[in-house]
Amino acid sequence: MAALDLRAELDSLLLQLLGDLEELEGKRAVLNARVEEGWLSLAKARYAMGTKSVGPLQYASHMEPQVCLQASEAQEGLQKFKVVRSGVHAPEEVGPREAALRRRKGPTKTPEPQSSEAPRDPLNWFGILVPHSLRQAQASFRDGLQLAADIASLQNRIDWGRSQLRGLQEKLKQLELGAA
Protein backbone atom coordinates (compact mmCIF):
# COMPACT_ATOMS: atom_id res chain seq x y z
CA MET A 1 0.00 0.00 0.00
CA ALA A 2 2.86 2.37 0.81
CA ALA A 3 4.33 1.69 -2.64
CA LEU A 4 1.09 2.87 -4.28
CA ASP A 5 1.08 6.09 -2.26
CA LEU A 6 4.74 6.64 -3.10
CA ARG A 7 4.07 6.06 -6.79
CA ALA A 8 1.13 8.50 -6.74
CA GLU A 9 3.31 11.12 -5.05
CA LEU A 10 6.06 10.44 -7.58
CA ASP A 11 3.60 10.88 -10.46
CA SER A 12 2.23 14.17 -9.13
CA LEU A 13 5.76 15.50 -8.54
CA LEU A 14 6.78 14.46 -12.05
CA LEU A 15 3.76 16.24 -13.55
CA GLN A 16 4.59 19.37 -11.54
CA LEU A 17 8.20 19.20 -12.71
CA LEU A 18 7.19 18.82 -16.35
CA GLY A 19 4.81 21.78 -16.04
CA ASP A 20 7.58 23.89 -14.51
CA LEU A 21 9.97 22.88 -17.31
CA GLU A 22 7.40 23.88 -19.92
CA GLU A 23 6.88 27.23 -18.18
CA LEU A 24 10.66 27.72 -18.03
CA GLU A 25 10.99 27.13 -21.75
CA GLY A 26 8.25 29.65 -22.49
CA LYS A 27 9.74 32.31 -20.20
CA ARG A 28 13.19 31.84 -21.71
CA ALA A 29 11.75 32.35 -25.19
CA VAL A 30 9.99 35.53 -24.05
CA LEU A 31 13.19 36.75 -22.34
CA ASN A 32 15.18 36.22 -25.53
CA ALA A 33 12.54 38.12 -27.50
CA ARG A 34 12.57 41.05 -25.02
CA VAL A 35 16.36 41.32 -25.05
CA GLU A 36 16.45 41.11 -28.85
CA GLU A 37 13.73 43.76 -29.06
CA GLY A 38 15.68 45.97 -26.65
CA TRP A 39 18.88 45.78 -28.68
CA LEU A 40 16.98 46.43 -31.90
CA SER A 41 15.29 49.50 -30.38
CA LEU A 42 18.65 50.71 -29.13
CA ALA A 43 20.07 50.37 -32.64
CA LYS A 44 17.11 52.34 -34.02
CA ALA A 45 17.77 55.09 -31.46
CA ARG A 46 21.44 55.21 -32.43
CA TYR A 47 20.42 55.52 -36.07
CA ALA A 48 17.93 58.30 -35.30
CA MET A 49 20.19 60.31 -32.96
CA GLY A 50 23.56 59.46 -34.45
CA THR A 51 26.13 56.97 -33.26
CA LYS A 52 27.92 59.51 -31.08
CA SER A 53 24.71 60.56 -29.30
CA VAL A 54 23.89 57.15 -27.83
CA GLY A 55 26.94 55.57 -26.29
CA PRO A 56 29.09 55.22 -23.20
CA LEU A 57 30.28 58.83 -23.39
CA GLN A 58 26.79 60.02 -22.42
CA TYR A 59 26.63 57.91 -19.25
CA ALA A 60 26.59 59.80 -15.97
CA SER A 61 29.82 59.86 -13.99
CA HIS A 62 27.99 58.52 -10.94
CA MET A 63 25.35 55.88 -11.62
CA GLU A 64 22.84 54.52 -9.14
CA PRO A 65 20.76 51.41 -9.76
CA GLN A 66 17.11 51.89 -10.63
CA VAL A 67 16.16 48.36 -9.58
CA CYS A 68 17.46 45.86 -7.04
CA LEU A 69 17.07 42.12 -6.82
CA GLN A 70 15.50 40.88 -3.62
CA ALA A 71 15.78 37.24 -2.57
CA SER A 72 13.33 35.80 -0.08
CA GLU A 73 12.73 32.37 1.38
CA ALA A 74 9.52 30.74 0.21
CA GLN A 75 7.99 27.42 1.23
CA GLU A 76 10.25 24.39 1.73
CA GLY A 77 13.32 26.63 1.84
CA LEU A 78 13.11 27.68 -1.81
CA GLN A 79 14.51 31.07 -2.74
CA LYS A 80 12.23 33.39 -4.63
CA PHE A 81 13.66 36.38 -6.51
CA LYS A 82 11.86 39.65 -7.05
CA VAL A 83 12.87 42.86 -8.82
CA VAL A 84 12.25 45.92 -6.66
CA ARG A 85 12.58 49.52 -7.80
CA SER A 86 15.18 51.28 -5.69
CA GLY A 87 14.40 54.68 -4.28
CA VAL A 88 10.69 53.93 -3.99
CA HIS A 89 9.58 54.86 -0.51
CA ALA A 90 6.25 54.98 1.23
CA PRO A 91 4.34 58.17 0.47
CA GLU A 92 5.01 61.02 2.85
CA GLU A 93 2.44 62.13 5.35
CA VAL A 94 0.68 65.28 4.31
CA GLY A 95 -0.32 67.59 7.09
CA PRO A 96 1.14 68.94 10.29
CA ARG A 97 4.21 67.18 11.67
CA GLU A 98 3.21 67.73 15.27
CA ALA A 99 -0.14 67.99 16.99
CA ALA A 100 0.78 71.08 19.08
CA LEU A 101 0.01 74.67 18.19
CA ARG A 102 2.82 76.60 16.62
CA ARG A 103 3.64 80.26 16.56
CA ARG A 104 3.27 81.67 13.07
CA LYS A 105 5.19 84.89 13.71
CA GLY A 106 8.69 84.88 15.00
CA PRO A 107 12.26 84.22 14.02
CA THR A 108 12.30 80.56 15.00
CA LYS A 109 13.04 78.26 12.12
CA THR A 110 11.89 74.71 12.00
CA PRO A 111 14.46 72.37 10.50
CA GLU A 112 13.31 71.00 7.19
CA PRO A 113 13.87 67.30 6.67
CA GLN A 114 16.47 66.45 4.05
CA SER A 115 14.67 64.91 1.13
CA SER A 116 16.67 62.30 -0.68
CA GLU A 117 16.93 62.76 -4.39
CA ALA A 118 14.92 60.22 -6.31
CA PRO A 119 16.96 58.33 -8.89
CA ARG A 120 16.93 60.19 -12.16
CA ASP A 121 15.77 58.56 -15.33
CA PRO A 122 18.84 57.41 -17.27
CA LEU A 123 17.18 58.46 -20.51
CA ASN A 124 17.87 62.07 -19.51
CA TRP A 125 21.57 61.38 -20.03
CA PHE A 126 20.88 61.37 -23.76
CA GLY A 127 18.90 64.61 -23.85
CA ILE A 128 15.47 65.91 -22.98
CA LEU A 129 13.64 64.80 -26.11
CA VAL A 130 14.81 61.26 -26.71
CA PRO A 131 13.39 59.10 -29.50
CA HIS A 132 10.58 56.72 -28.75
CA SER A 133 12.79 53.79 -29.72
CA LEU A 134 15.10 54.59 -26.78
CA ARG A 135 12.14 54.48 -24.41
CA GLN A 136 11.06 51.18 -25.98
CA ALA A 137 14.55 49.79 -25.43
CA GLN A 138 14.42 50.79 -21.76
CA ALA A 139 11.01 49.15 -21.33
CA SER A 140 12.18 45.97 -23.07
CA PHE A 141 15.22 45.66 -20.83
CA ARG A 142 13.11 46.31 -17.71
CA ASP A 143 10.72 43.54 -18.76
CA GLY A 144 13.75 41.35 -19.37
CA LEU A 145 15.00 41.96 -15.84
CA GLN A 146 11.67 40.93 -14.37
CA LEU A 147 11.61 37.82 -16.55
CA ALA A 148 15.18 36.94 -15.52
CA ALA A 149 14.16 37.07 -11.84
CA ASP A 150 11.12 34.88 -12.58
CA ILE A 151 13.32 32.41 -14.47
CA ALA A 152 15.80 32.23 -11.58
CA SER A 153 12.95 31.49 -9.13
CA LEU A 154 11.52 28.89 -11.47
CA GLN A 155 14.94 27.28 -11.94
CA ASN A 156 15.30 26.98 -8.15
CA ARG A 157 11.88 25.32 -7.97
CA ILE A 158 12.86 22.90 -10.75
CA ASP A 159 16.13 21.99 -9.00
CA TRP A 160 14.23 21.38 -5.76
CA GLY A 161 11.68 19.23 -7.63
CA ARG A 162 14.44 17.16 -9.23
CA SER A 163 16.05 16.48 -5.86
CA GLN A 164 12.67 15.51 -4.40
CA LEU A 165 12.07 13.22 -7.39
CA ARG A 166 15.43 11.49 -6.90
CA GLY A 167 14.68 11.02 -3.19
CA LEU A 168 11.30 9.46 -3.92
CA GLN A 169 12.81 7.18 -6.54
CA GLU A 170 15.40 5.96 -4.01
CA LYS A 171 12.66 5.34 -1.42
CA LEU A 172 10.64 3.40 -3.96
CA LYS A 173 13.68 1.34 -4.96
CA GLN A 174 14.42 0.53 -1.29
CA LEU A 175 10.79 -0.39 -0.69
CA GLU A 176 10.72 -2.71 -3.72
CA LEU A 177 14.02 -4.35 -2.69
CA GLY A 178 12.70 -4.82 0.85
CA ALA A 179 9.46 -6.40 -0.43
CA ALA A 180 11.32 -8.76 -2.78
Image (cartoon, grey):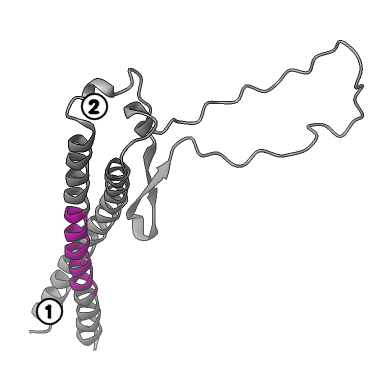
Q: Is residue 71 above or below residue 165?
A: above
How busy is the neighbourhood of tag 1: few (under 14 within 10 Å), some, or many (20 plus)?
Answer: few
Where residue 172 appears, as percent x and y from the top left, is 15, 76
* Magenta residue check for 31: yes
Q: Viewed as shown, does residue 23 lie left or right of 73?
A: left
On the image, numbered disc 2 is attached to which residue?
53
Give the quarter of the figure containing the C terminus.
Answer: bottom left
- Confirm or deny contact between disc 2 and disc 1 (CB under 8 A): no
Going by the picture, which residue comes out furthest to the top? 107
The residue under the point 67% across, 23% down is: 113
Which quarter of the figure has residue 70?
A: top left
Disc 2 from disc 1: Cα separation: 73 Å
Tell me the element at label 2. Answer: loop
**Residue type of the residue flagged with mark 1:** Gly
The residue under the point 23% across, 39% down is: 45
Which circle's residue, 2 or 1, is located before the other in the chain?
2
Which quarter of the figure has residue 134?
A: top left
**Residue type of the residue flagged with mark 2:** Ser
Q: Is residue 94 above or below residue 101?
A: below
- In the rendered structure, which segment of residues is drawn in magenta? 16-33
Where residue 115 appears, as percent x and y from the top left, is 60, 25
State the mark number for residue 178.
Answer: 1
Q: Is residue 174 above or below residue 115?
A: below
* Magenta residue check for 179: no
Q: Viewed as shown, does residue 2 lie left or right of 139?
A: left
Nearer the observer: mark 2 or 1; the answer is: 2
Secondary structure character of the magenta stretch overall: helix
Which quarter of the figure has residue 108?
A: top right
